[in-house]
Every structure is written in C-alpha cells, then in structure tokens.
Image: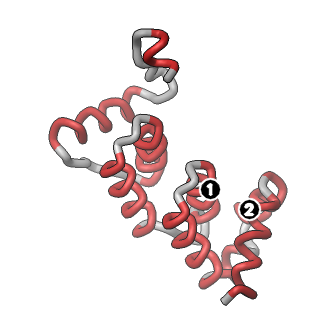
Amino acid sequence: MKEKIKGSVDIVDFDNDTIRRMLLYMYTDSLEDLQWKSALRLYEAADKYQILSLMEKCSAFLEDHLTSINACDALVLADRHQDNSFKEVVQNYILDRNEYVFCSEEWKTLLENNFKLAAETMHKVWKK
C-alpha cells in the first residue's frame, strides 16, 4: 500500500465532515444526522479504508433513501466500488420505476457518461 511506503495515511481525498463522521463511527459505532450526500462520501471513505461495517450501514441508508432522481448516482457509486449486491438493489429499483427513471435528466446523463452501465441495467429486463 502506498500508505505503508510513504509512512503516513493520506486522507485529503475527503472533506472534514466525512473524516469526522468516519472517526466518530470508528469510536462510537454510530452515525448521526446522515443525509444522502454525506452517506455517498462516507461510503467512499469506508471503502477506501476497508471499514466494511460502515460501508454496509451507508449502503443500507442509501438503499432506504433511493429516489428516481438519485438512483443513477447510487448506481454509479455501486459500480465504481464493485459492490454487486448494492448495485443489484439499485438496478432493480430503477427497473421497477423505469417510466420515471428512464425519462429523467439523470438517466440521460448516465447514458452519455456511462453507456455500458446503463445498457447493463436495461438488459436485466430480459434476463428475468
């Protein structure tokens, strides 16, 4: 790991709130006042530092708060972090609400930026 070679841990990838929340969780096993954006950032930090229980709590929060507007962000996050169970939940959510999601600006952006992921999600319709 680059941290071992360097002799220190580089946490500048995350804002102060994310670092504070991650440390609070590590010391108290609690999450306070979690919102969508903070859960996304915390999930990324938990994955980077392999805090699996925190990743699970963040993905559970994100799953519980999916909407047709934020589902594409969640799908990209799950795919980028190779979290197949979270990704499947999000894909199923999208497919169950396809008439709303597929018409959204967020879906159009996903098609432009990550066509393969959008096609993979749409292909699940025929795999059922």
Which image quadrant for residue 82?
A: bottom right
Q: Marks 2 and 1: CB-CB under 8 Å?
A: yes
Label 1 residue SS = helix
The residue that appears at 52% across and 57% down in the rendered structure is 83
Please, which residue is most extreme toward the left here? 28
The crowding category of the residue bearing disc 1, from other C-alpha atoms within 10 Å (few below 14, some 14 to 19, many at least 20), is some
Q: Which residue is mark 2?
A: 117
Residue in front for this viewpoint, 103 or 74: 74
Model colouring: secondary structure
Placement of 70 over or under 15, stated as above or below:
below
Q: Amino acid at mark 1?
A: Asp
The residue that appears at 36% across and 57% down in the rendered structure is 56
120 left or right, relative to 34: right
Counting labels gives: 2
Q: Which mark, by number, is residue 79? A: 1
Placement of 69 over or under 42, stated as above or below:
below
The residue that appears at 42% across and 49% down in the rendered structure is 39
